[in-house]
Image (cartoon, rainbow, N blue to C red):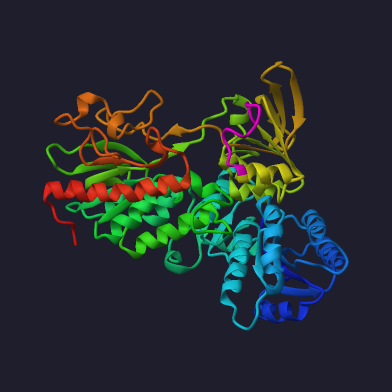
Amino acid sequence: MNASAAEPAAPPVILLVSGDELDVLADQFHRYEREYDVRAVRSAAEANAVLKGARRSGQPVAMIVTESRLPDEQMLMAMHDWRSLVPTARRLVVIPISRFGEESVSLRPYLQKGKFDTYLVLPQGRRDEEFHYAITELLSDWGATVATSEIDSVRIVTPDARPLALAIRDFLDRQGLPHRTYTPDSPQGQETLARLDGPPSYPLVHLTSGAFADRPVLMPTSTRELGAMIYGRPSDIEVDTVVDLAVVGAGPAGLAAAVYGASEGLSTVVIESEVIGGQAGTSSMIRNYLGFPRGISGQRLGQRARTQAIRFGARFFTGWPVVDLRPGAAGEPHTLVTDGGEVRARSVLVASGVAYRRLGVAPLEDLVGAGVHYGAAMTAAREMEDRDVYVVGGGNSAGQAAVHLSRFARSVTILIRREDLAATMSRYLIDEISWNPRIDVRPCTEIVDGGADDGGQLGWLQLCDVRTREEQRVAAGGLFLLIGAAPHCDWLPADVRRDEHGFVLTGREVPAECWVDGLPPENLGTCVPGVFAAGDIRAGSMKRVASASGEGASAVSLVHGYLEGLRVPPAP
């Protein structure tokens, strides 16, 4: 838990390591000295001394920037030692331009295995902004996933690490809202308590700045409730307004539809039950998404897409699950029903995504939020320092979670029921996991039991070999469950047909009795005219971020065609 320190913490270290090019690096990093403790050394041995000193004193290390050749040690060996000393630091290799052609090729296999985060050409002059763009991206990623916020635009006050407090922190992290956590007896906690009229119900959420500063202290009972308190109710839309496009779900598919729909003049509303970004928003680093050569976190991707959609006029309502869809008859508007109000729309895109399947082990379900987490739980990763952590799942989300957790945990074990990861995980992640000394993969294994330690947190797991049924009890400080996919569509009417697993049928997959004049609906169209589906919720989808984004964007062209058929011009 974060409490206000009596003295300001030491600034994070940026360590520069080079034999021949140190002066160039030091000159380039002069601009960061106001916010970071920039250290410059000429050898791997000196770098080791600096990093050991920082670790002893508790000073965070944000980044290590090293020349590709060092005078006293092979760079990759040094990088391995530095990763062991400060696993959360971002690692960058700079190559002089005279050697870039040769070394960029020889270092590429090690980059693919995750031995460092990226390599760049050593700057040739002043104001090399392409170089600094990469630096600030890496520092931003470090700040979002590792560092404790120094800004408390939102204060969370709680006496202990209860599950709801952790869930609220994760919600705020994914929304990009700076926050800190305080105990009730801290000065900040006392200030928050003084604003209450009655007895507190923890955790308390105090919005201290910006547009929310005049709001009372909140005592939410769920993250959905918090989202609704901050972002408003769907009933804020005027009763008589009929929007062109209502999007249910703000994962990659819904966000892409919001951007393209709003940018093309459609009045667009997005209703999200939990957090912007959907399941993809929990991914610590997506490295194979087009246009982001250094990767992008799901949190960042969701935040940027939301900002982009708002710029074009889309409206977002967070914390309001859609509980019913009432299709309009004969071209009349459809109605989406939430507990916070109704939205009437000429067209609807169902992009509500999927949820991770439940493990079904009762003692562990009781520990959700107390060491057991569904999804990557980015915020919880920080709490896993020096713990033995288990990840259940063989997909990309599980692989990304394991890599991120390895920056904090003593060990990470991926549990899968299959023989290996080849059929379910991208090759780049398999290679990165196989190299990482902190990550092991345990095949043909399932969890059959588990329990808490004396403090009420997860303490142990009972593992079972699915072939021999032999069991083993292991100590566990964290469990992250990323297994399978259950669709979010119980709220849909029977008119919107689904397959035997509950995924929405579209295009030629729709039963023939729903076809019109012998023709199936459009590729993303459902049985109900004007209702479309995209992303993971759709039967036959690829379950990848890029494909979901593509489907969301493609759906907008189908919406245009449908609205044209209604002969209704887009609302101004």
Judge left or right: residue 32 versus residue 208: right
Quadrant assignment, res 295: bottom right
Q: Quadrant of residue 81?
A: bottom right
> Residue 313 location in percent, x, y?
30, 62
Q: Nearer the viewer, residue 42 or 233?
A: 42
- In the depicted view, which residue is nearer to us: 308 or 423? 423
Residue 400 on image: x %, y %: 61, 45
**Residue 552 painted magenta:** no
Name, please, the residue furthest toward the bottom.
126
Instruction: Report if residue 452 is visible in the image.
Output: yes
Q: Residue at x 22, y 55 (%)?
A: 238
Residue appearing at x 30%, y 50% in the figure: 234
Numbered disc total: 0
Q: Position of residue 327 (x, y in %)?
A: 21, 37
Q: Magenta span: helix, strand or loop, mainly?
A: loop
Q: Is residue 200 above or below residue 358?
A: below
In the displayed structure image, the side of residue 376 where residue 536 appears, left or right: left
Judge from the rendering whether residue 167 lies leftward or rightward of residue 349; answer left or right: right
Q: Most extreme residue toward the front, as rendered?
A: 102
At 17% from the left and 44% from the top, the residue drawn is: 333
Q: Magenta stretch: give its range.
A: 416-427
Res 200 seen here: no
